[in-house]
Amino acid sequence: MFGLILLACLALSLVCVVYPMYVIRPFRAQGARELAAALVVSRYRGMATVISALVALATLAGYWRMQPRKWRRILAAVGASLVCVFAVLARINVYELMFHPIGHASFAGAAKSKLDGGEKVIAVVINGQARAYPIRGMAYHHIVNDEVGKRAIVATY
Amino acid sequence: MWTREVDGQRLTFHLAGINNQNFIMRDEETGTYWQQISGLAISGPLKGRQLTLVPSDELTVAIWKSEQPQGTVLNDVPKYVSEYAKRDWDVRMQRTSTVIQFAEHGMKARDLMLGIQAFGASRAFLFDRVLKEKLVKDHVGAEPVLLVAGEDNQSVRVFRDRIPGVDSAPDFYRLTPPKPGALLMDAATGSEWNFQGCAVSGKEQGVCLERVQALKDYWFDWRNYNPTTTVWGK
């Protein structure tokens, strides 16, 4: 029974980590329903994998008390460790590993900018304040949370 | 470009995935997932909510600096500069496959378009052809629009093809050769107009045309989010 519980925890945590990554990946078409399912899994997997890890550890503790043979103990420990690893992996945003967020954005005055005249920017003017976001950088960072003309905006590309 | 305040709450967005090659973002305050191109919340507590579009231009630095000498520009992050898109990224991107195609109107998936969603209709213009024509007069829905290529022959702006307060059709044409600070003239009033759509001389001096928001996008992505779009010239 302990084995079954551990396996169930492992399966649940594996699905939580792998399913969204499988569905939501570049160069693969996403259907509307599978995307919706993958996003629901993504939203709850932080909590689900932590609960799964706690259950796995409690199960391991209970199993060890029964003093089974060494190789069974090791197998159970490996299984529970994997469940814990998945709980950590579930919190990693792989997309921000591929495309690092900009962190603290800094800006230069137009006159001081060393950008070549032919470079392309996305430009906004809000309440009289003008700001430009170079496209080559935006194509990497994808997102910049900013405030322009006292308005909170998100620059996206 | 979107505002990031919903119901008075300021949201902070993170890259969170991809959906048919348009990216998904998640706000850290509510954990809601939003589609980048539409600004629509697609999963989570704020599902169904819509971010407000912030009008923007895609311009060359040369034009932007000439128009906004007091503006500020985002700095590169030195740690990641080596990973930024290369100067010929748009040429390289043309060779990248897409997962959806929409081979309609004879269009190819990565045809670069200028998409306009306004006046109750969607219409897409082949970007390179607009640049070639330099001035395009067309309609989106029932509204006449003007597509104007900048002097850099890379930037395009779209305006409503009517002068505020003037009943007759403006009948714009390009000044050849262009004058400093003036690209167009209208036959109706004889005024000269700059790339910002404002009259710099003539009867309408100081008047500005109404801007129409346009999006530079690949055909497959534009068509995916604008299923009823028409295509100029097709």
Image (spheres, helix red, strand yellow):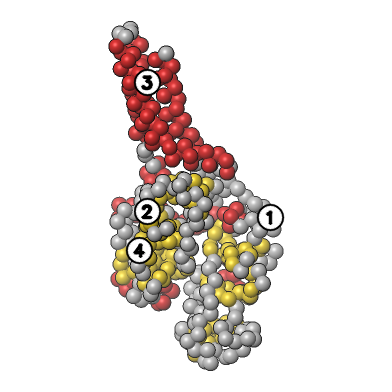
Residue B86 drawn at (x, y percent)? 42, 56
Q: Which amino acid does label 1 sit on?
A: Glu
User: What is the distance, in whole Å, between disc 1 and disc 3 at their CAs?
Assistant: 52 Å
**Looking at the image, can residue A138 be seen?**
no
* Disc ID at residue A147: 4
The image quarter containing residue A92 is top left
Please tell me if label 1 and label 3 are on a single chain: no
Query: Residue at (42%, 19%) from the top-left corner?
Result: A5
Please, what secondary structure does the residue beneath circle 3 have? helix
Residue where numbered disc 3 is placed: A79
Please tell me if label 4 and label 1 are on a single chain: no
| Residue closest to the eye, B39 or A122 | B39
Q: Residue furthest bottom?
A: B203
User: What is the distance, in whole Å, between disc 4 and disc 1 at their CAs?
Assistant: 40 Å
User: What is the distance, in whole Å, between disc 2 and disc 4 at their CAs?
Assistant: 11 Å
The image quarter containing residue B71 is bottom left
* Neighbour tally class for label 1: few under 14, some 14-19, many 20 plus, Cα within 10 Å: few
Residue where numbered disc 1 is placed: B104
The residue marked by circle 4 belongs to what chain? A
**Looking at the image, can residue A36 be seen?**
yes
Residue B123 drawn at (x, y percent)? 63, 64
Residue where numbered disc 2 is placed: B12
- Mark earlier in primary sequence (3, 4): 3
Query: Residue at (48%, 34%) from the top-left corner?
Result: A19
Q: Residue furthest front?
A: B7
